[in-house]
Amino acid sequence: MLCTTTAAIGLSAGCLADDASQPADDDGDDATDDDNGSPTDGSEDDPDPVGDAIEDLPDGLADVRTLTYQSPASSEPDITVLRDAERAAEWLDEREALHNADAVATFIDATDFETSILVSLSDEAPTPCYEVVIEAITIEAGESSDSDSSAGETETSDSDEHSVAEDETLVLEAAVHETAEDQVCAQSITTVGRLVRVTFESEPLTTVSATLVGHDGSTYDTTMGSDSGSASASSTVESEWDSGSESQSSDS
């Protein structure tokens, strides 16, 4: 059983929406807006202007940035962990219809997969006036690390620290929300998503657990555990959607 070792980051939909990318009619301008900020020219002061930074991070995380995206198509809820540049490029190629594909590509290119992972969360929405909002990010420890810490103070070796890190899980909670309740939006089934870059203080955690609540209240849960700490390691995935469940193997 997991117990939380760091405080959750409460992010209200309204607060994040103020800083997040705009709905569909503005998403296509994300790359242009960022180009106006001259990402290349301003690389010395701000090497990564694309996306929104999340503050008040739990211990163990050095940085978290997110970027919204949309595509004009329906889809099932999806949570994908990208641990290397090759897999991230494949993920982007599979989504040719993204409104802000250039901004997403820049966001991916700026990722250092030695210390970071990307997590994509997406779901279907009835109109483009929705977005995925990150509501909490925590790092949770497993029973083994808890029992070790309660056993008393002992000398900790590098191997012990690595073992504790392997027991920890990165946990993300997200939900699909309207960007503005008073905004008039034409009915058009749209896939809305958010790409989250999580940068760790050391090497990335090997286990990621994520929950995505749809606009209709349906819940999709998944836990992905990498078989090793390497960036290209395969992952095992256990997913649950509402009351149904499935287990599958994934290369993400």
Image (cartoon, rainbow, N blue to C red):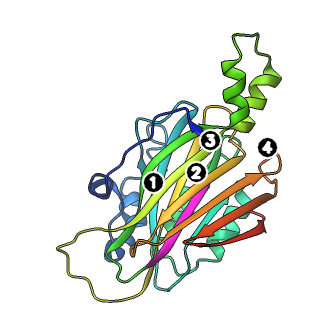
Is residue 68 shown above or below 126? Answer: above
Label 3 element class: loop
Label 2 element class: loop
Task: Place residue 26 in its image quadrant.
Answer: bottom left
The label number, if any, that marks residue 229 in the structure image: 4
The CA span between labels 2 and 4 is 21 Å
Chief SS of the magenta region: strand
The label number, if any, that marks residue 50 in the structure image: 1
Is residue 214 shown above or below 18? Answer: below
Disc 3: which residue? 2
The label number, if any, that marks residue 110 in the structure image: 2
Q: Are marks 4 and 3 in contact (CB under 8 Å)?
A: no
Mark 2 Cα shell of 10 Å, populated few (<14), some (14-19), many (≥20): some
The CA span between labels 3 and 2 is 32 Å
**Residue 125 % position (x, y):** 41, 79
Give the amino acid at mark 2: Ala
Looking at the rendered structure, the number of numbered marks drawn on it comes to 4
Mark closest to the chain's N terminus, 1 or 2: 1
Is residue 134 shown above or below 104? Answer: above
The CA span between labels 1 and 4 is 27 Å
Mark closest to the chain's N terminus, 4 or 3: 3
The CA span between labels 1 and 2 is 9 Å
Which residue appears farthest toward the bottom when viewing the image?
187
Q: Say whether residue 77 is left or right of residue 16.
A: right
Mark closest to the chain's N terminus, 1 or 4: 1
Mark 1 Cα shell of 10 Å, populated few (<14), some (14-19), many (≥20): many
Mark nearer the viewer, 3 or 2: 3
Residue occupying the point 61% across, 53% down: 209
Q: What's the magenta region? A: 118-124
Task: Place residue 89 in its image quadrant.
Answer: bottom right
Give the amino acid at mark 3: Leu
Mark closest to the chain's N terminus, 1 or 3: 3
